[in-house]
Amino acid sequence: MSYSRKIMITGGAGFIGSHVVRLFVKKYPDYLIVNTDALTYAGNLENLKDVEHLPNYKFEKADITDEKRIDDLFQQYAFDAVIHLAAESHVDRSIMDPLSFVKTNVLGTAILLNICKNAWKGNYANKLFYHVSTDEVYGTLGETGFFTEETPYDPHSPYSASKAASDHFVMAYFDTYGLPVVMSNCSNNYGSHHFPEKLIPLMINNIKNRKPLPVYGKGENVRDWLYVEDHARAIDVIFHKGKLGESYNVGGFNEWKNIDLVNLLCKIMDQKLGRKEGDSASLIQYVTDRPGHDLRYAIDATKLKNVLGWEPSLQFEEGLNKTVDWYLQNEEWIKHVTSGNYQNYYQEQYQARTN
Ligand code: NAD
Ligand code: DAU
């Protein structure tokens, strides 16, 4: 079969990447999608069980910092586009081990950009490097205001600093070499297949198992939550219609204080698990705050709506209900990802916070 597009999707075995791969593989049978992922602790091919048999899907285990391996894949497939999601993605891990974030997020992105530049050799027609980034590059907001595409970068964690550096490399390749790039900066995602080191899946898993619910600081930090399938739809729109050299903010206009969100999850799960109201909330435990903890994120996604016509499709309570149902129905998935190393991570991360 000759494909109309040949796309490398990096990090396709992770949380957001798997939703992007699923959407593209199903929606575009004439695109070849090559999921390129190192399968770190966060990568899981079980996330793609439902689409792995499709003829336009391929998986290649590869580390984006392995220049030769990525170059070989470019020779093999002659990609005309990259959608780059592979990253170390958890802020708390970046505080424990910052250099692995520099390696994957900065060096890995620079290697991909350079390989695209060399492989496409200035023949940039119908080529695209799409970089998936985060709102955390903008730093923190006070009680009011929003991040727009013009907000200056001001990252505070090793994670956000590494993503900011990678964003700068992307734009430098556009300015210097004319590489066709587009970028998006999204707010916090939630939904199925989310690794339970992040707030929502961690709380769902702990509520289910009646374990303490560790809320950092006073629980007053605010995040702007977007359903992961809405993010994948935004990536689809930006990939096809985004203007080269531009970035697009993606968000749900859906701000929640952490403590309010955890209480809502407790309420939803009390109902679903047949517990009496207030039962799960009694598990809440305030623990030592995250160092450099950004107070508030809130995305202004007006550009994406006005220029490209994207809007979030789901109300938060509906999305949370779907998410909780998915975790309750997929016990095997959660069992696999929380065995072994996860237990060591959890102990190291949370023991120190509760002492
Ligand atoms: P994730 O941690 O769930 O998945 C990351 C994936 O990248 C995994 O499959 C992992 O195996 C792979 N990976 C890691 N290092 C690699 C390497 N060196 N080479 C190849 N593959 C490697 O992350 P996620 O939450 O799905 O985030 C995906 C992207 O979206 C990241 O770039 C992240 O910065 C960005 N983002 C995430 C959110 C969010 O709320 N989760 C919001 C905005 C932007
Ligand atoms: O904003 C986009 C970013 O969102 C992405 O770029 C990151 O990859 C993603 O991990 C996420 O970062 P956060 O740090 O906002 O997400 P996290 O789920 O780790 O934490 C959300 C909030 O909940 C944050 O204020 C810290 C708090 N928290 C988190 C955990 C894991 C707790 O109070 N307790 C916890 O146990």
Image (cartoon, rainbow, N blue to C red):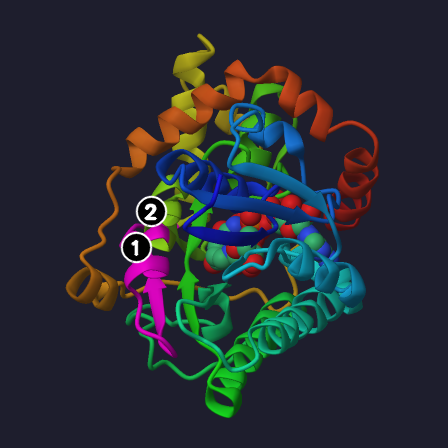
Q: Which residues are magenta?
A: 236-256
Q: Gap in Å between the C-alphas at discs 1 and 2?
A: 6 Å
In the rendered image, is residue 219 in sight? no
Q: Please state the horizontal and vertical placement of residue 96, each as a whole percent of the image.
A: 78, 60
For disc 1, the marked residue is: 237
Left/right placement of residue 152 relative to residue 99 reads left
Q: Please state the horizontal and vertical placement of residue 73, each as a whole percent of the image.
A: 69, 56
For disc 2, the marked residue is: 233
- State the image quarter where residue 246 is shown: bottom left
Name the residue: 64% across, 54% down: 90
Name the residue: 30% across, 52% down: 252
- Looking at the image, do the residues carrying marks 1 and 2 touch, with CB atoms under 8 Å apart? yes
Is 215 situated above or below 157? above
SS at mark 2 in the image: helix
The amino acid sitting under disc 1 is Val
Q: Is residue 10 magenta?
A: no
Q: How many marks?
A: 2
Name the residue: 74% across, 60% down: 72
